[in-house]
Amino acid sequence: MLKAVVLIGGPQKGTRFRPLSFEVPKPLFPVAGVPMIQHHIEACTKVPNMKEILLIGFYQPNEALSRFLVSAQQEFKIPIRYLQEYAALGTGGGIYHFRDQILSGSPEAFFVLNADVCSEFPLEEMLTFHRLRGNPETFLMLGTTANRKQSLNYGCIVANADSHEVLHYVEKPSTFVSELINCGIYLFTPAIFRHIGAVFQRNQQELLLEENANGWQRAEAIRLEQDVFTALAGQGRLFAYKTEGFWSQIKSAGSAIYASRLYLSCYSQCHPERLAQNRTGGPTIRGNVYIHPTASVDSTAVLGPNVSIGKGVTIGAGVRVRESIILHGASLQDHTCVLNSIVGWDSTIGRWARVEGTPSDPNPNDPYAKIDSETLFRDGRLTPSITILGCNVTIPAEVVILNSIVLPHKELSRSFKNQIIL
């Protein structure tokens, strides 16, 4: 039997995702109409013999998370549990801390997926690839190709072209190492815990040498990438499976719009029922658009490509929306124009207003380009990026909001450009 672990992190991370992460834990942020981690869970449930999915993180178990777990268990008919860390333990520390829960029922192997990636999740292919090696002492990581410049922002893998063995692994190198990067999706057997345990022992030894260090808390913080993979590389234990499918990180709100596009285009194959169609008396749909069944959209609106409309959203006459995510309860009054933006929960955009951002998409002419996880500021100025309205923001009629971030519960009175409105 198999299990899967999704690492969902916790509230002190996701700062680049503000102001959206104020309202909902980042893993539950809707991408292409469903919570970000639902894509992971769905992919895991398609793997035959998957018995349980564990979410590991240090969010307080809140109402939103509990509701999500209940509905996901009903929908996918599989046990899904949340295991809460007492502190941020890193990508390896969390699974080591909960190793008994992962190993209960003795799974032959388990997947580990980072919550902040969007992917086609070729889990069955990884499993087949791993089983062909037939060695329970080996582990598998998913890799993809990045361009030379961007590879420095990721974990870089040097692998043998024939055997696919990982010979060398460096997390975020300072000079070029390899175009093959780590996707944050792994297939482990129980043997991995010996290697993580060795790191734990070593951390403890080091702490004993530092007299006054704050005890065991730090020994348990273990990073799979720097502490475990770097050591396993070149030992015949770690292999890389390269995917040609789509993959992207979701670090900033801008990357959520890009991830939404990747998933929406995938829906035409895997979930055609989620895509809106052009119907007489309905709005004009261009490209891939998701509309929640409870949303009310005027027939003269034009939506798409890459638009996701949440539940209870109201869209008035003559509205134009493109490359945007409109979250639940928002209201777009007549003739508003929303481009490259995320409109927060229960926000209102007045008539004839225009809300527009600048896409931070990867270079379309480079097949291996990834999305840049930009800093908000460059040379002391806000970098033009997508526009984000937090929850309960009111935009008056006939104003223009351009490349700006508006924090929750703001009522604006005029136009803004390139600003963070506190």
Image (cartoon, helix red, strand yellow):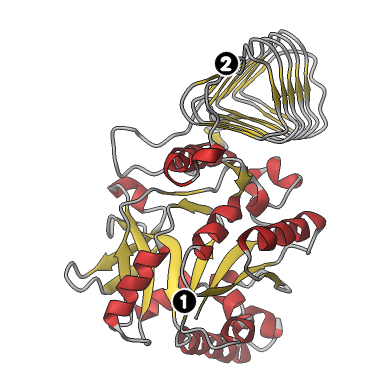
Q: Identity of the amino acid at label 2?
A: Thr
Q: Position of residue 302 (x, y in %)?
A: 57, 16
| Quarter of the C terminus within the rendering | top right
**Residue that lies at the very extreme toward the front in this rendered image:** 280
Residue 333 falls left or right of residue 262: right
Disc 2: which residue: 280
Q: Nearer the viewer, residue 226 or 144?
A: 144
Crowd around label 1: few <14 · some 14–19 · many ≥20 (10 Å): some
What kind of residue is marked 1?
A: Asp
Q: Residue 23 is drawn in which quadrant?
A: top right
Asked whether the viewer can see residue 16, the reply is no
Residue at far left of view: 162
Q: Secondary structure at mark 2?
A: loop
Q: Residues within 10 Å of mark 2 (few under 14, many from 20)?
A: few
- Label 2 to label 1: alpha-carbon separation: 58 Å
Q: Nearer the viewer, residue 178 or 315?
A: 315
At which x and y percent is residue 65?
74, 58
Q: Residue at x 78, y 27 (%)?
A: 393
Q: Which residue is mark 1?
A: 227
Q: Residue 251's spot in the image, x, y percent?
A: 55, 48
Q: Is residue 286 above or below residue 20?
A: above
Q: Residue at x 35, y 51 (%)?
A: 245
Percent from the top left, x then y, of residue 196?
50, 83
Can residue 123 be seen?
yes
153 in relation to 404, above or below? below
Instruction: Note whether 257 is above or below 199 in the view shown.
Output: above
Horizontal side of 72 relative to 393 (left or right) equals: left
Corner quadrant of residue 134: bottom left
